[in-house]
Amino acid sequence: IKVIGNTGSNSTREAIHATEQGFAVGMHAALHINPYYGKTSMDGLIAHFQSVLHMGPTIIYNVPGRTGQDIAPSAILKLSRNRNLAGVKECVGNKRVEEYTESGIVVWSGNDDECHDSRWDYGATGVISVTSNLVPGLMRKLMFEGRNSDLNSKLLPLMGWLFQEPNPIGLNTALAQLGVARPVFRLPYVPLPLAKRLEFVKMVKEIGREHFVGERDVQALDDDDFILIGRY
């Protein structure tokens, strides 16, 4: 099993420290996001990533919807000169995926609902996925066993359900319903409402419980079953 440590931070100092610690205890690669909230220039982004690239294999994570800033292709192309750039997790879309793959840069889709087309039409290596936490076997099949539009269509409603609120709200709710995780949420995250949890129960039955993680029957759970924690 290869371990990719999420050691990125909007603080370069914290990113350096976490990455040093991660490689020291045996992680195989680091995942680095660009600085969020305290945004910087493209030159600043390049300097931020260069401060950790020398430590080992690195995947750069571009998700403007969360960071508020797109990592320009020109920055990625410059960083790709470093042999430790393992690739990019790209959330901008398939045209960006294609741009990188045509330049010889390894790309993983960061959008579950686009990953099938990213893989088979635009050259992505695969996907760094949320849905795979629930149906790992089906997602592996979608990525590595050839084009499968029927399976993709079957999974799209689940993907839509997972992302109706910011991740990891849907995922954590689903894992609790499957009995895989305790129904405990650290604020500001709160579980999806009962109506949405009932939708998930129906989806599990339609896709097949055997494809999902865990062994317990899926449950809607009551609102009182969830525990919200503010200080921890």
Image (spheres, helix red, strand yellow):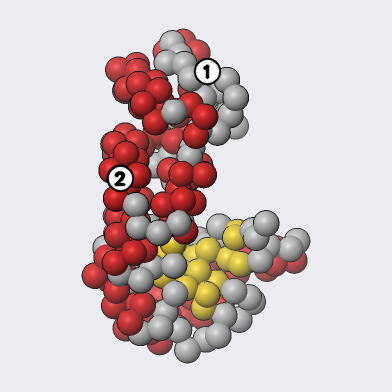
**Callout 2, which amino acid?**
Asp
Q: Is residue 12 left or right of residue 69?
A: right
Q: List x then y, in percent, for residue 83.
A: 55, 85
**Callout 1, which amino acid?**
Asp
- Up-down relation of residue 70 to residue 130 (above or below): below
Task: Identify which residue is drawn at 44% across, 62% down.
Answer: 126
Of tags 1 and 2, the one toward the viewer is 2
Q: Give the crowd class for mark 2: few <14, some 14-19, many >=20 residues within 10 Å.
A: few
Q: Which mark is residue 186?
A: none
Q: Which mark is residue 217?
A: 1
Secondary structure beneath disc 2?
helix
Q: List x then y, in percent, for residue 80.
A: 45, 84
Q: List x then y, in percent, for residue 44.
A: 40, 78
Quadrant housing residue 15: bottom right
Residue on which the image places disc 2: 150
Instruction: Work out whether residue 66 or residue 167 is closer to the camera in this orientation and state it.
Output: 167
Quarter of the image where the C terminus is located: top right
Secondary structure beneath disc 1?
loop
- Up-down relation of residue 143 to residue 98 (above or below): above
Is any atom of residue 115 visible in this view? yes
Residues at marks 1 and 2 touching, judged by CB atoms closer than 8 Å? no
Q: List x then y, in percent, for residue 95.
A: 24, 70
Task: Identify which residue is drawn at 53% across, 63% down.
Answer: 31
Instruction: Work out whether residue 37 or residue 59 is closer to the camera in this orientation and state it.
Output: 59
Quadrant housing residue 2: bottom right
Quarter of the image where the N terminus is located: bottom right
Q: Is residue 92 left or right of residue 23?
A: left
